[in-house]
Amino acid sequence: MQHPSDWLPLLICVPAGYSIRAQYNRFVATFHVENFGCRATQADGAAIERQLLARGMERAEAADEAEVVVLNTCTVTASADKDARASIRRIHRENPEARILVTGCYAQRAPEELSALPGVSLVVGNSHKHRLADYAAPLGNAFVPLAQIGGNHSRLVVGDIFAHTELMAAPVFDSDLSEKTRPNLKVQDGCNNRCSFCIIPYVRGKSRSLKLEQVLREVNDLVASGYREIVLSGINLGRWGRELSPRSNFAAMLRTILQQTAIEKIRISSVEPMDWTDELIELVASSPRVAKHAHVPMQSGSDRILRRMHRKYRPWHYADRIERIRRAMPDAAIGADVMVGFPGETDDDFEQTRSLIERLPFTYLHVFTYSSRPGTPSAEMPEQVPVEIARERNRVLRELAAHKKREFMQSFVGRELEAITLTHCEGESTEALTDNYLKLHVRGRHEANVRLIAAVHSLQADGLYGSLAAA
């Protein structure tokens, strides 16, 4: 059969009103990308979209409208795996003609498991994600047999993730889907730590950093595109630059961005506690162009459990970092990841975690219940905590976190806060995010991506409310 492009000369002499483009567009493949999990995965999804658009494919608004559906998966918990499988089944049920390509962390960990699901045409691991367009573009072309894709007559394209020594791309994704206001720039991938509960190093490989010149180029491109705030993200962000030559560090990169770009505001995503050096704390505290926001993974407040987790700090080390951040930035948002139900966690271990959280100046928490991951050391540990006990501990910490967050928000009523509008609003107020990571409703209709100073009037169930501060 001839390729559609061979037919175009035959369509030059056509009746009035006949659309050549409409006929040709029938052969332009459409795609839809669904992302699961962390900021890094979301950023990878944006990079995939870049690849597919560059190949001439067109974006579909929904999976049931696309010829090729890419599922960019997470595998950090059993629940994440379950969500991915459920989405595959739903997409195949609603759009049985779609070719489903599965990629991401779950695809790297268990490709055979995914390839056995109905509707899955191809599984591409993180090892080959940077070449995903090579595999996805032919999926949407009815004239290329599926067996030729990948060149090895296989439905699996997965290799050694540890063979990667460089960050292959600079993925950017927009965290606010309705408007383009706060893009996330992934500058680091992979992790050299071996926490006993974590599968991520095995599916993302060694720590790799985006070279400084490429970081600066991406930031300058975002500024030129009209962005006013960006979020720097990575799998182990604080390790940026350690493997580069010459060796560098995250604080040095941040300082260079401030010196050599015009970005108005930089927000830092999660950084491990011992990477919150005095240099980094001082830089974030002193620069008005860096958001006053620190997310510092904690996992547990029990020294015994931290050791079983293979974490590289002790509770007193962690507390020292948090207290230093608070002294340097009295109004900063300070958040943490906390895990409950780790194997062997006793009532006393949990109480140590609860009391440390109560004592420290957190403004929010992400609380997770332990999920056993095949292939990790913790999966083989004895004394697995019953699910009902872990869930109760989760509830206790969530209630404590909600109380701390409300107290923090209440302290800003009657004060002025800097914020950026997230969406264009046609109602009575516009949603915004403050410099210190609080949801704020600003009275009146405002365009998205506007930096402003708001006077905070009240705290309601869905956030702070205020109006533009008097000039």
Image (spheres, helix red, strand yellow):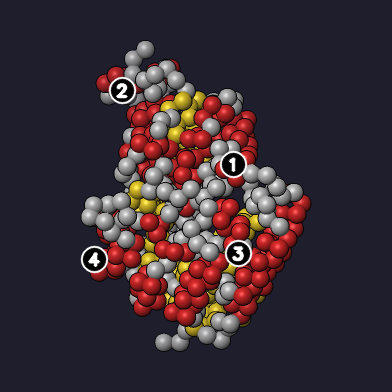
> Where residue 21 sits: x, y (%)?
35, 32
The residue that label 3 is drawn on is 301
Badge 1 element: loop
Visible residue check, residue 190: yes
Q: Amino acid at mark 4?
A: Gln
The residue that label 2 is drawn on is 5
Alpha carbon of mark 2 to alpha carbon of mark 3: how far? 64 Å
The residue that label 1 is drawn on is 373
Check residue 260 in the rendering and tell me which mark sits there, or answer none.
4
Earlier-in-chain disc, 4 versus 1: 4
331 shown above or below 142: below
Alpha carbon of mark 4 to alpha carbon of mark 2: how far? 46 Å
Alpha carbon of mark 4 to alpha carbon of mark 3: how far? 40 Å
Alpha carbon of mark 1 to alpha carbon of mark 3: how far? 22 Å
For the residue carrying disc 1, how many other residues have a C-alpha within 10 Å: few (<14), some (14-19), or many (20+)?
some
Q: Residue at x 71, y 54 (%)?
A: 390
